[in-house]
Image (spheres, grey):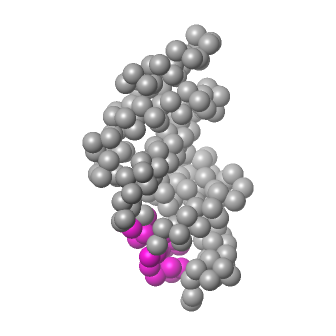
Amino acid sequence: MMLFFAALETVEKPSEKKYVRSIYDRYAQHVKGIIVSRYSELNDEADDLVQLVFVDVIKYRKHFLSASDNKIKYLLLLITNHKCLDALRKLRLEKSFFDGYDAQNLGKLSQNDDCPCLTTVEDDEIIEKIKKIINSFSDKPRDVLMLKYFGEMKYREIAEITGLSETNVGTIIQRGTEKIRKILREEGYIYE
C-alpha cells in the first residue's frame, strides 16, 4: 500500500489527487478480485499487483479524469491484465496464463463456437503475435477484441462499456477475427 501512496504524493493538483484516491477506494478490492480469480498463480502477489495497477492509474490519470464508470472499469481491467501477465512472465512460468484460459479462448477467436479459426494455441509466440495484431487495429476494434479475448467479457458487457450495439460488437469481433486469421495464415502460424 505504500507504493501507491508514495506515487500519489507526486500528483500536484489536489483535485486530481482526490479523484485518483477515490478511484483507489472504490476499485482496489475489485482489482484484487480480478487478480485472485483469474490469476490464481499470483495470489501471493495480489496486494503488490493492486499497488502497481493504481500506480499506473496515477501515471495515466488524464484518461480517468473524465471517464465514465464503465470506462474506468475497462481501463482498470486492461491495466490489471497487463500487470498480471508481466508478473507471470517474471515468475518464468513455463505454462503461463495463456496456456489456460486464453489458449482456449483464443483458440476459438470467433463470433461463435461453431466456427473456430484456431484449433489449438500451442505457444506463447502465437499469443504474442495475436496481441500485436490486435494492438495494430484502430481504437474501436482493438478495444472490443481485447475485451472479448483478454477480458473474458460477453457481447452485452462489451456493448455497455463501449456504447456500441451488441450487433456492432459482433460484427467487429467477426471482422477482427477474420483479419487475425488471415495474418496468422500468411505468416505461417496456422494452417487451415
Q: How many numbered marks have been drawn onto this rendered protein structure?
A: 0
Residue 62 spot, x, y in % from top left: 65, 28
**Residue 22 visible at all:** no
Above/below status of 130 relative to 152: below
Q: Quadrant of residue 43?
A: top left
**Who's the residue at 66% across and 79% down the image?**
187
Above/below status of 67 relative to 82: above
Residue closer to the observer: 6 or 98: 6
Q: Quadrant of residue 34?
A: top left
Query: Quarter holding the C terminus?
Result: bottom right
**Residue 68 visible at all:** yes
Locate residue 113 relative to residue 135 in the image: left or right: left
Locate residue 136 relative to residue 75 in the image: left or right: right
- View extreme (top): residue: 14
Residue 88 spot, x, y in % from top left: 40, 53
Question: Is residue 105 rendered magenta in the image?
Answer: yes
**Who's the residue at 39% across and 57% down the image?**
92
The rendered magenta stretch, by its main secondary structure, is classed as loop
- View extreme (bottom): residue: 192
**Who's the residue at 45% across and 24% down the image?**
4
**Who's the residue at 59% across and 56% down the image?**
144
Q: Which segment is the magenta one?
A: 99-122
Question: Is residue 83 rendered magenta in the image?
Answer: no
Residue 1 spot, x, y in % from top left: 37, 24
